[in-house]
Image (spheres, rainbow, N blue to C red):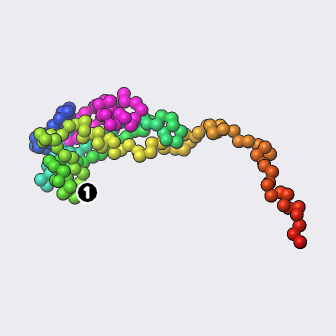
Amino acid sequence: MVKRAPSRFNPDLLAREDVRFEATLPISQFPRLSELVLETDGNLVASFDVHERKSHRVVRGSLTFDAVMQCQRCMEPFSSAVQANFELVCVNTLEEANALPDALDPVVLDEDGQLHLVDLLEEDALLQLPDIPKHEDDDSCQPDVNSFGEIQNQEETQKPNPFGALKDLKLS
């Protein structure tokens, strides 16, 4: 069964149900993600479920969105399709998060024992963005040949050698 994801939820209650949740949220709802992309008019699409595993509540799902970023080679915008799978273990405190094995990714519940959907998805979306945004292929972002000025003729750039007069002196 697939349901629309709530904006805030208690993973304890959802783990008891065998339900898959789906959400389509505008990128403009994610404040930190909006700062890193050039266009915020697209949507982030996510689906997830919550289940119990070895006394842990686990949120497992995937998200996809198109990120329009500025290429750091040519400074032109480019679009990159972002797709990520996530699996997060719900914990109540940072101490519990630090006690988990390194293979498990924790998510800390708020003071009411709930998760906020936007916060949950934004963290994983940010992790999927490249550190240095650039076109995948070098052919897409070639700088203009004349963008750094013209190359002078070699004859114009030859300067007289300051030690040229010394070559005529003979050592005796």
Residue at the location (43% across, 36% down)?
69
- The residue under label 1 is which amino acid type? Ala
- Residue occupied by mark 1: 103
Q: Is residue 15 left or right of residue 172?
A: left
Q: Position of residue 170 (x, y in %)?
A: 89, 67
Q: Which residue range is magenta in the image?
A: 21-49
**Picture quadrant of residue 125:** top left
The residue lying furthest to the bottom in this view is 172
Residue 21 appears in the rendering: no
**Picture quadrant of residue 40:** top left
Residue 73 appears in the rendering: yes
Classify mark 1: helix, strand or loop. loop
Q: Position of residue 172 (x, y in %)?
A: 89, 72
In this rendering, the answer to whether 134 lies above or below 7 is below
Q: Position of residue 61 (x, y in %)?
A: 25, 43
**Picture quadrant of residue 148:** top right
- Indicate whether residue 29 is drawn in magenta: yes
Front-lying residue, 109 or 10: 109
- Indicate whether residue 50 is drawn in magenta: no
Residue at the location (15% across, 37% down)?
9
Q: Quadrant of the N terminus?
A: top left
* Neighbourhood count class around disc 1 (C-alpha, 10 Å): few under 14, some 14–19, many 20 upward: few
Residue at the location (22% across, 37% down)?
117
